[in-house]
Amino acid sequence: MKNIDYAHVIKAENVRPIKDHVLVEDMDFQERTTKGGVILINDDATTSGIRPRWAKVYSIGPEQKEVKVGEWALVDHARWTRGVLIKKPDGTEQVVRRIDFKDILGVSDKPTDTY
């Protein structure tokens, strides 16, 4: 498991948010490489880290009609919760975060560069 800061650890099989809320996984906090080959180090928690980030939609609430599980959402800066580590009965682990639906800038079938 990656070295990720998470608020809680829960054991669960199916976690689903309420109302129109959205849970995401695989949020991009890693280093990036520009088209010219310049490596931009992990910039989370720094001034240069203020940017939108891609995250894969993990689960949606029953009232959510705008995004689908499996899509990638581009989320405005800092519009997500700290991660929660979910430990499933099959031994797999996943860090999920709740994002504010109103702060989703767009969705895509795959993430693209954001610099």
Image (cartoon, rainbow, N blue to C red):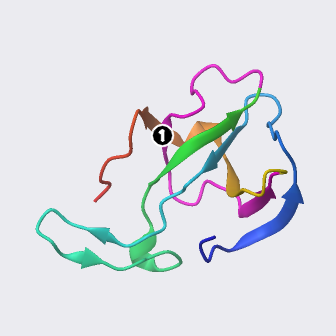
Q: Residue at x 32, y 68 (%)?
A: 32
Q: Give the quarter of the figure containing the N terminus.
A: bottom right
Q: Residue at x 61, y 54 (%)?
A: 79
Q: Position of residue 106 (x, y in %)?
A: 44, 35
Q: Is residue 74 magenta?
A: yes
Q: Which residue is mark 1?
A: 72
Magenta stretch secondary structure, dominant: loop
Question: In the image, what residue type sits under mark 1?
Answer: Trp
Question: As rendered, which of 27 and 43 lies closer to the eye?
Answer: 27
Q: Which residues are magenta?
A: 62-88
- Local secondary structure at mark 1: strand
Task: Name the image quarter holding residue 39.
Answer: bottom left
Q: Note whether 64 is above or below 6 in the view shown.
A: above
Q: Residue at x 44, y 70 (%)?
A: 30
Q: Position of residue 114 (x, y in %)?
A: 32, 55
Question: As rendered, which of 30 and 63 lies closer to the eye?
Answer: 30
